Amino acid sequence: MTDLERILPLWRELESAGADYVLTTVVGVEGPSYRKPGALMLITADGRRAGTVSGGCLEAEVASRAWWLTKDGPTVQRYSTAADDGDMPYGSGCGGAVILLLERSTTARVLLSAQDRAFSSRTSLAVATILEGPHTGVRAVAGAASSPAMDEDLQGLANLAFRRGKSMESTVDLDGMPTRVWCDFRPARTGLWIFGAGDDAQPLVRLAKELGWFVALADGRSHLATLGRFPLADETRVLAITKLTSQSAHLLGPIQPHDVAVLMSHSYEQDFRVLLALLAGSVPVRYLGVLGPQRRTRELLAEAATLAGVAQDRIPEQVEDWLARLHAPTGLDLGAESSESVALSVLAEIQKVLTSSTALPLREVRAAQAVPEATPTTMPTV
């Protein structure tokens, strides 16, 4: 479960009760930091907290002063985690600093409402927030969860961050003064479509839900694809396997372009028909993995090509073309043997693809980059 999954239910409870709250947002970091810009923490008047803004060293201190600091409106505060910082040491020894925006419900409601809508609809959004002056905390939202903005330039920055698909810093002219704005791009919630409802799919569902993903499970066998077997799944579907063709990809479910999929039914007919619907049906997914040896996957693809009406002499070429679009076998080489470790291997590779990461040990990445750990983290500017 992610921070947002903890924050949103508490926020809805507070809104329903008409209770005030403090929202804390990481809007910048200097040097090493456990959390990055965009991290949230919600604080209630009775002392409850949801979400984190550090690895645990700052939360209690931030919460203890949050209500006092925000009594006159939103405020931006700097918290040092350096062990030798005599002004505000928090004992972590990380050597960096975290810049936080603290605000009450009056301004925070815009952000959390947009987050709630985007989370439910699994859409991306960008939020431009003013970080200084009398308009601190005023926002503009771009995306499906957009809302009216007080300033056209502010809305323009939110729209720009949304189009670029990345966070950035900039300025707008307010009351004749250049004013700092932080634009936070938040990608759509990942959806994992698991085709195959065997026992080995159960740990994959559990781990994906821990990551905060939307998880859908589908299988042609109605006795396997049940809520009783997969209580954590957001959706379970019984597939009409024999009806799956290159023209019937819609039968698989409402798959979105930012979603990922894994085939693991251990059923030859199911797998090649699902591959046919996904590949020949041109369903756009960020990642498509197939469990099992590549030899089996080639056979599945040849079967799918035949059913799709590909000329016999072109089937080998079509198989290679489709194979290049797959992760087969799915997963990273982690020495996985159990269903749980296989699930970890699969999700690790998906995470690597989604974030365009190397999957190398961090010490090797740091050595290759040759970047000192104390280098400030900066956001792109426009």
Image: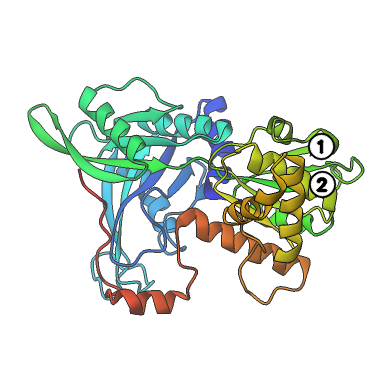
Q: Nearer the viewer, residue 99 or 200?
A: 200
* Residue type, mark 2 in image: Gln
| Residue at 25% over, 71% down | 85
Q: Is residue 8 above or below residue 93?
A: above
Q: Nearer the viewer, residue 106 or 19?
A: 106
Neighbor class of circle 1 (other Cα within 10 Å; few <14, some 14-19, many 20+) is: many
| Image quadrant where one finds the C terminus | top left
Q: Is residue 230 above or below residue 130?
A: below
Q: Position of residue 122 (x, y in %)?
A: 55, 35
**Do tag 2 and tag 1 residues touch (Cβ < 8 Å)?**
yes
* Mark number displayed over residue 8: none
Q: Secondary structure at mark 1?
A: loop
| Residue at 50% over, 53% down | 354
Q: Residue furthest left?
A: 176
| Residue at 39% over, 45% down | 24
Q: Secondary structure at mark 2?
A: helix
| Residue at 37% over, 36% down | 126
The residue beneath circle 2 is 270
Q: Residue furthest front?
A: 313
Mark whose residue sits in front, 2 or 1: 2
Whether residue 359 is visible, yes or no, is yes
Q: Quadrant of residue 375?
A: bottom left
* Residue type, mark 1 in image: Leu
- N-terminal of the pair, mark 2 or mark 1, is 1
Taking the image as shown, residue 134 lies to the left or right of residue 32, namely left
Q: Position of residue 301 (x, y in %)?
A: 71, 52
The residue beneath circle 1 is 239
Q: Nearer the viewer, residue 177 or 124?
A: 124
Taking the image as shown, residue 12 lies to the left or right of residue 371, namely right
Q: Nearer the viewer, residue 271 or 149?
A: 271
Q: Is residue 187 above or below residue 356?
A: above
Whether residue 233 is visible, yes or no, is no
